[in-house]
Image (cartoon, grey):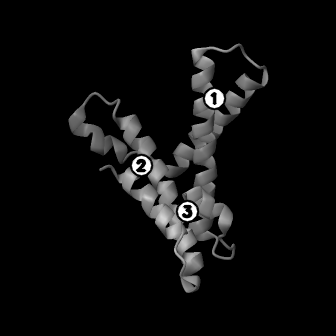
Amino acid sequence: MSLPSELLPLASHLANLDAEAHRQASFRRAVSTAYYALFHLLVSETTLNWSRDETRSALGRLFEHRKMKGVCDKKVTELNKLLKDNPQDSPELTVSKHLLTIANTFVQVFQERNDADYETSKGMGPDQRAMAN
């Protein structure tokens, strides 16, 4: 079983714990765990395209969270410009729409994880729990 496929159910479990005394901690860990599921999925899928099997693991360790967010921010801007002109349906348009969804999701989850891990004055609640599910 892959790490992302283990992390996502764990995030859901953490988000749905009923222990009132640990609700904030559970939500925060759920959001962070959901983010890491997405991060590791994207890294894993990307490194699968690397032709040298023996160096895939090392390649995966080169991915940096903030740089990935920056790439996604740039791609969101680029794709929004492309899509605002209502281009004709095509396989490329379909791929662009899916890529926009992925990039937007990464940016959103990155920020939610940052808030969960570092903005302790902010409360975590149902919006973040829905993300972890």
SS under mark 2: helix
The residue wearing badge 1 is 97
Left or right of 1? Residue 14 is: right
Q: Earlier in the sequence, mark 1 or mark 3?
A: 3
- Return the disc, 1 or 2, that comes first in the chain's sequence: 2
Q: Residue at x 50, y 51 (%)?
A: 65
Task: Give the percent coordinates (x, y) of residue 100.
Answer: 63, 34
Q: Which residue appears at 63% of the width and 62% of the height?
A: 128
Q: How packed is label 3: few (under 14 Cα within 10 Å), some, or many (20 or more)?
A: many
Secondary element type, mark 3:
helix
From the image, tell me which residue sits under label 2. 40
Residue extending furthest bottom? Answer: 21
Please state which of residues 112 and 19 is positioned toward the viewer in this rendering: 19
Is residue 13 rendered to the left or right of residue 98? left
Query: Where 61 sits versus 10, above or below?
Result: above
- Residue 31, disc: 3
Above or below for 116 versus 96: below
**Front residue (pair 106, 127):** 127
Q: CA distance from mark 2 to mark 3?
A: 14 Å
Q: Residue drawn 72% across and 30% down?
A: 80
x then y, percent, for residue 56: 29, 39
Q: CA distance from mark 1 to mark 3?
A: 25 Å
Q: Amino acid at mark 1?
A: Lys
On the image, the x and y values in percent for residue 93 come to 63, 20
Image location (x, y in percent) of residue 19: 53, 82
In screen coordinates, is 29 left or right of 72?
left
Q: Label 3 sits on what residue type? A: Val
- What amino acid is labelled 2 in the image? His
Q: In what quadrant of the picture does the C terminus appear?
A: bottom right
Give the distance between the C-alpha atoms of the residues marked 1 and 2, in whole angstroms.
Answer: 22 Å
Comparing labels 1 and 2, the label whose residue is closer to the camera: 1
Q: Quadrant of residue 58?
A: top left
